[in-house]
Image (cartoon, grey):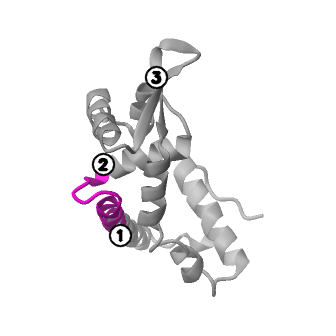
Amino acid sequence: MSADSGTPQERASAVRSLEAEFAELINHTRRVMVENANRVSPGMLPGAYKVLSTIERCEEVTASALAERLLSDKGQVSRTVRELEDLGFVERTPDPRDRRSALLRVTPLGSQRLAAAREPQEGRLLRTLEEWSLADIDNLTRLLRALVTGVSPSRD
């Protein structure tokens, strides 16, 4: 252990504090998703918003790949996609690589609604970090990447 590793109790306390901050970040993200879902279509569930925004990020994706990416049940994803199709936000086209499958894409209406829903939050992170140094932003990015990958962060 390095000199700055602290006692086991101090480390456990620091990790609990970090977990609490992640919980707050997750709750904030959920609130934003609820708000955005309602702006896309009143009464839309956050899960449908997540499906719609994931399809948009992928540009085109099969329902199976979408379910896998979202770690969701294929049946639930299929029902949600049908709802989004009924609203005119998603369209299916035959997959040229596998005619048994269809590719999902966000329609122009879906893209327009997503953009309008996101507009109130656009730039929020940029504004929040505008007084941070580039070194601090890079360090946070490096640390989050290390946390996600399970690799010890290296100090360059």
The CA span between labels 2 and 1 is 15 Å
Q: SS at mark 1? A: helix
Residue at the limit of the structure toward the right, as seen here: 156
Q: Of discs 3 and 2, which sits in the foreground?
A: 3
Measured from the top left, where is residue 147 in percent x and y?
A: 54, 56
Residue 1 in view, yes or no: no
Question: Residue 101 is drawn in which quadrant?
Answer: top left
Observer-side mark, 3 or 1, equals 3
Q: Secondary structure at mark 3?
A: strand
The disc label shown at residue 47, or none: 2
> Height in image: 9 above or below 1?
below
Tag 2, which secondary structure?
helix
Query: Nearest the camera: 152 or 110?
Result: 110
**Res 90 quadrant in image:** top left
Q: Is residue 106 above or below residue 125?
A: above
Q: Upstream in the sequence, badge 3 or badge 2?
A: 2
**Amino acid at pointer 3:** Ala
31 magenta-colored: yes
Residue 111, magenta (yes or no): no
The residue beneath circle 3 is 102
Q: Amino acid at mark 1?
A: His
Dot 2 and dot 1 residues touching (CB under 8 Å): no
Q: Which residue is mark 1?
A: 28
Q: Quadrant of the N terminus?
A: bottom right
